Each structure stands twice: as C-alpha cells, then as structure tokens.
Image (cartoon, rainbow, N blue to C red):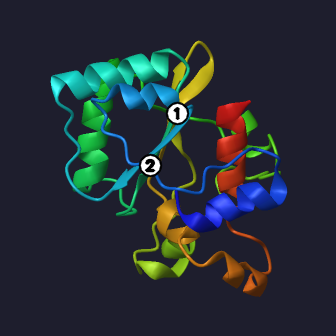
Amino acid sequence: MPSNLLNSLVEYTTIPVDEKEKIVELSSEEIFKSPFCYLSGHKLVEFSQEERKNFKTYVEQGGFVFVDDCNHDIDGLFAKSFEEEMSRTFGQDALQKIPNDHWIYRCFFEFEDGPPATSFELNGWGDDLVHDYLKAIEINGRIGVLYSNKDYGCEWDYDFRNKRFLKIDNTRFGVNIVVYALT
C-alpha cells in the first residue's frame, strides 16, 4: 500500500501497522499470514493454476484482497483480464457491483455517495470517466475481493506530510477499506 495510507492508519486507528513493505507471491504459503493483501497494476492479469488455487483458498478462508486498476478504465487490459481471471477463479457472476450504501462506505468514515472520486477521474486522465461504483466478490455475505478501477493507489501515493495541504484527507476511504477488511 502507499506509505501515505499506512500513515493514515496509524493516525486515525489503533490497528498495528508493519511499515515494511512485503511482496508475496500468490503461489506462496506466505499469503496466508496476511489478513489483507493489495494487488495493483495496469498490465495483463493471468494466474497460474497454483496461483489461482492459492488466491481462491486465501479469500474463501477469510483473507481480503483489495485490487486497484491503475489504468482507470473499463475495457483496458488490466480491467478485462482481471475480471476474466475472477470469473475463472470464482465463477462467471462472482464479481458484482456493490451498492453505494454498503457498510464499507460507513464503517469508519462516512461516504454517503459511495466510493469517492479520485483526482485522476476528475481531471487527471481527461476522459471525464467517473466510476460511481466498486465491484466485489462476496464470500458468506462478506467482501473477500474488492475491485476498483478508480486508481486509488496513485491517488494515495504521495508523501504523508503533504496531507496538510488537502482540505479533506483523500486517504480516508483507504482507512475504511482496511478497517472493513480487518473487523
């Protein structure tokens, strides 16, 4: 996760945070030691059979994966290939839009209109494409995979000391995601 979001977790919550980044292969048993995983990118998403099995087991056993498309698009390579991979892994209709009144939008900070827009949506890409929803795979009534094509990772990727220049801290929704995943 971007270090700015880790700073916000320390600032707003009592959740213990390991500030050292860990990169874990999807095929590794190490993934089962982390209750929260972050997957981001802009290229092709294609799991090996072993990675697919591990990913599915991780989510079905209560792990949470936040996936963020850095392309901020709908029909781009990352978006299409990730959604196809989720269909192969969990079934054709597993990845669904979540309603904008879902608990994830109010479990810590309140987001009455659902997922907050990013600066990339509002002016960064110049395509006027604002996504008003997120998608998720739910396991036993709880989100196991949260998918965003809003490019939150880039939105939150700045030095935490620069938050003082923002009227509203844009990492607050990231705090909600982590709080939801861990409670």
Q: Is residue 18 above or below residue 46?
A: below
Q: How many marks?
A: 2
| Residue 121 position within the rendered picture, expressed as x and y whole percent measured from the top left | 50, 70
Q: Nearer the viewer, residue 71 or 65?
A: 65
- As drawn, the residue found furthest toward the bottom would be 165
Question: Left or right of 87: which side holds 167?
Answer: right
Q: Is residue 101 above or below residue 13?
A: above
Q: Quick check: can you spot residue 11?
A: yes
Question: Left or right of 78: which side holds 163?
Answer: right
Q: Quadrant of the C terminus?
A: top right
Q: Locate residue 164: give its quadrant.
A: bottom right
| Residue 31 position within the rendered picture, expressed as x and y whole percent measured from the top left | 42, 31
- Crowd tier of the residue under label 1, counting other residues whose Cα lies within 10 Å: few below 14, some 14–19, many 20 or above: few
Q: Which residue is mark 2?
A: 22
| Residue drawn at x 31%, y 49% as measured from the top left | 79
Q: Quick check: can you spot residue 172?
A: no
Question: Left or right of 32: which side holds 109?
Answer: right
| Residue drawn at x 78%, y 73% as measured from the top left | 168
Question: Left or right of 1: which side holds 141?
Answer: right
Q: Nearer the viewer, residue 42 or 4?
A: 4
| Residue 123 position within the rendered picture, expressed as x and y whole percent measured from the top left | 51, 81
Q: Which residue is mark 1?
A: 34
Q: Locate residue 80: give its quadrant.
A: top left
Three-letter code for the amino acid on which mark 2 is drawn: Lys
Three-letter code for the amino acid on which mark 1 is drawn: Ser
| Residue 37 position within the rendered picture, expressed as x and y whole percent measured from the top left | 49, 40
Tell me if label 2 and label 1 are in contact, CB under 8 Å. Answer: yes
